[in-house]
Amino acid sequence: MTATISRIDQLIEAARRHLEGLLALRADMAGEPVPERDAAADDDFAEQNLIDAGTAAQRAGVSKQTIRRWVTDHSIGFKRGGRLQVSIPRLRRHTGDNSL
């Protein structure tokens, strides 16, 4: 199931990139300014870019302890209300795996 969710996340990201390209092309052809990107999409710690430590561990194929260490040592997340929140973009960059 984790592989399926990961694949869905990949497809959503690819679709988002394609849509942005189409919007920019349309704006260019119509002589309109190119629409601005959603600032939250660029924010590694925006709510839609966060997952819990257990999910991050499953996606990355590592233990929760490894995720905890990466949060501390590599700033891939933070603690909120006693729970670790992991940034998907930072996890992807840290592991070098864009399919996470």
Image (tube, rainbow, N blue to C red):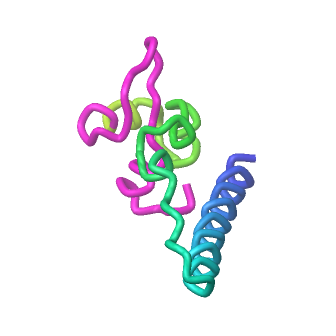
Q: Which image quadrant is residue 17 in?
A: bottom right
Above or below for 30 versus 35: below
Above or below for 26 versus 53: below
Identity of the residue furthest to the front in this view: 31
Q: Residue at x 33, y 34 (%)?
A: 71
Above or below for 84 versus 100: above
Q: Which image quadrant is residue 75 in?
A: top left
Q: Residue at x 45, y 12 (%)?
A: 81
User: Is 64 displayed left or right of 94 in the figure?
Assistant: right
Rendering coords of residue 99 (x, y %): 56, 61
Total labels: the figure holds 0
Q: Residue at x 68, y 64 (%)?
A: 11
Rendering coords of residue 22 (x, y %): 64, 77
Identity of the residue furthest to the bottom in this view: 29
Identity of the residue furthest to the left in this view: 73
Rendering coords of residue 35 (x, y %): 53, 65
Magenta stretch containing residue 6, yes or no?
A: no
Above or below for 75 versus 15: above
User: Is 79 displayed left or right of 4 in the figure?
Assistant: left
Q: Out of 86 and 45, give the one closest to the viewer.
A: 45
Q: Out of 46 and 20, give the one closest to the viewer.
A: 20
Q: Residue at x 55, y 54 (%)?
A: 100
Rendering coords of residue 56 (x, y %): 52, 40
Magenta stretch containing residue 98, yes or no?
A: yes
Q: Which residues are magenta?
A: 71-100
